[in-house]
Image (tube, grey):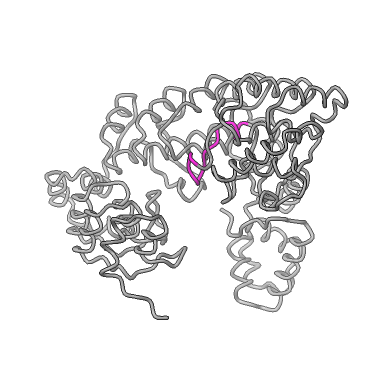
Amino acid sequence: MPTRGMPDRPHLDSFRRQARALQRAVRAGEPDAIARLARHHPDAALAEDGSGLQLSAAQLVVAREYGFASWPRLARYLQTVAEHGWDTGLGGRPMADPAEEFCRLACLTYSRDDGPARWAQARKLLAEHRDLTKANIWAAAAAARPDDVGRLLAQEPGRAVQAGGPLRWRPLFYLVYSRFDPDVPAENVLTVARQLLDAGADANEGYLFDAQPTPFTLLTGVFGHGELGKQRQPCHRDWAALARLLLEAGADPNDSQTLYNRIFEADNSHLELLFEYGLGTGDGGPWTRRIENLDSPTRMLRIQLRWAIEHHLSERVRLLVDNGVDFRSPFEGDGPAWSPGDGRTPIELAQLNGNTEIADWLLAKGAVLAPDPVRDLIAAAFRNDRSTLDQIRAEYPDAVAQARQDRPGLMVWASSQASIDTVTLLAELGFDVNAYGRGDAPVEQSWETALHHAAVKGDVALTRRLLDLGADPNLRDMRFDATPLGWAQHFHRLSTIEVLEGVTAIPEA
């Protein structure tokens, strides 16, 4: 797993300088540098005596810190970034030219600027400058104007594959990422897409946003959504027809960024369509060949399965399993922090999260569930099944202590996923109501407390119960340094603001 984040504008020279600095620091005996060497280099002896550390060894450490198995793989990735990288900062730079400014405002950029207010500005600009698409292929594509696109391509067919405009994209990308007007006729959108594809546009076009290793492709733009939600990052209005057009033109259905962006909603329409065109099969297409450490199609779907089980998305579990996703094997190997390779099987996760419906269905499909008193105890708590809980405690007296040791942040996960009764039961079992954990995934990371999640959900009953159980309203989360009240205020949760204002200490000036 990487321990360093890729900079926005990476260049091989900066990584060379990092390697040389590490080499000098190890040779000088600096403890932090020696610890980095011990963590990332396979030869443990080097950490014992690094006085003669070679540059190649330091380069390997740097490469592994950024998530690459070797220095050559890092170098190849940086070459890919140089060719396919994109700076999201371009979306925040106003342009003097109306056509350029229209392009900038009309499209999703997967930045904090996305949203209806921005697209309204694009509509207003186009209304004021109706001819801005006449001479600009990127504006004509973003506005989905077939007459202008056809004329411009007839004059110069190479425009179909020319990167430009304020975002430095090719025309088809502007069309697919455009969100400025839901009333643009679908036939206009599809006609422009066909014009550009027929003129040589690549159905697998994509960019590495801010040098991150998962490409944002045309399909990513079609299906939309993401961490800002479907209101600010919606799917394209004509997503189904446009996606089919791209898939028929050769777009690879194994689109990892699409799968991530759509993971948060219960809707499965994107998966159903992608499965029609081979999702989960093949080698992953051209992007897998460009970026060596991208997840395979099989692994992409296993991550989807884990998320669906942990977040009670029963229909998605059924869809994935019915389309051949492995539901018997344990999750092994490194994965995202929210989908670790911790050796648990899908049915164990279902039981652990108290989802008996999914667990019973997986059992009926042929999954095998071995007994585990700690897992069974937590599962019983999530079901608020006190009878089973008492039975487990009688048979395995150490199960509760072991559960607290294994899952110290369980109260946080329970606050976001389970009932008030489960939260109360966990407190009775000795789980710390003020422990830090994660509420978006059942993994142990010290992010926030249970009270933070109750506050941001606007759940007054849970907020009051946690306070009654001893939750400290003055604790600050580990990412944003905010109290639960701060979370409620940021997300305008008026109901929990009212509860927390009276118990949260006023910060000193």
Question: Residue 344 appears at what percent x and percent y?
Answer: 38, 43
Which range is magenta? 219-231
Q: Quadrant of residue 189?
A: top right
Name, please, the residue furthest toward the front.
Answer: 128
| Residue shown at 64% from the left, 77% from the top | 30
| Residue shown at 61% from the left, 41% from the top | 108
Question: Residue 448 appears at what percent x and percent y?
Answer: 38, 61
* 140 shown above or below 240: below
* 248 shown above or below 86: above
* 118 shown above or below 31: above
Q: Quadrant of residue 257?
A: top right
| Residue shown at 27% from the left, 31% from the top | 357
* 39 shown above or below 85: below
Most foreground residue, 397 or 148: 148
Question: Residue 210 appears at what percent x and percent y?
Answer: 66, 51
221 magenta-colored: yes
| Residue shown at 26% from the left, 65% from the top | 471
